[in-house]
Amino acid sequence: MAKMSLQEQMMKAGLVNQKKLKKAKKGSKKSRELAREVKASVEEKKQNEAEKARALNQQQQEEKQKKEIKAQVKQLIGANKLDLKGGDIKYNFTDGTLIKFVYVNSLFRQQLLNGLLSIARFEESYVVIPSIVAKKVAMRDADAIVETQVAEEEIAEEDDPYADYVVPDDLMW
């Protein structure tokens, strides 16, 4: 005896008719399509949430790295700042469009002019630090360094349009 499907058995027994079978098949097809749509929607939502989580994580990593760099800069400047107490010469420099000054002694003034020392921002004020340290700080945060003179040996002589003009040693501005 050949195997009959459940649908055929139910029709033979008179429990269902052809119309009810078609309706049942149609309903199950709709439920399968709906299940696929729901599954696709859930997958898309998971992907969107994962993407948001990755973006947030990257942003937090960048903020953490910025804080670490800021702390390194503060530590470098704080550990290498020179004591300017007793300075009696007003050394002027520009910070953006503003003219600022620090009081230094004659040795520090000469070293600032020769490019051996630089001026950096430190906690709402200005400090003098060695130019070697200023280069390290500038690699991390260029905005922390206010002024660095280029050492005379680093200036190309043929590029200097004012080479014929002599600047007095005692000139201060």
Image (spheres, rainbow, N blue to C red):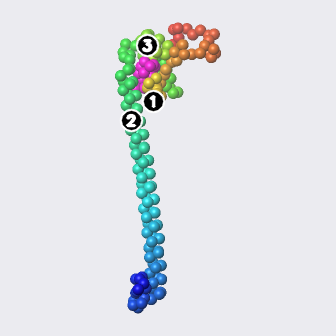
Residue type, mark 1 in image: Asp
- The residue stretch that appears in magenta: 118-134
Residue under label 1? 141
The image's mark for residue 67 is 2
Give the quadrant of residue 126.
top left
Local crowd size for mark 2, using a 10 Å CA cut-off: few (<14), some (14–19), many (≥20): few
Whole-percent x, y for residue 10 in the image? 40, 87
Location of the N terminus (image quadrant): bottom left
The image's mark for residue 108 is 3
Contact, CB < 8 Å: mark 1 with mark 2? no
Residue at left 47%, top 11%?
110
The answer to whether one can see residue 128 in this image is no
Residue at left 45%, top 84%?
21
In the figure, 46 relative to 33: above or below?
A: above
How far apart marks 1 and 2 lie (CA) works out to: 11 Å
Whole-percent x, y for residue 107 in the image? 43, 10
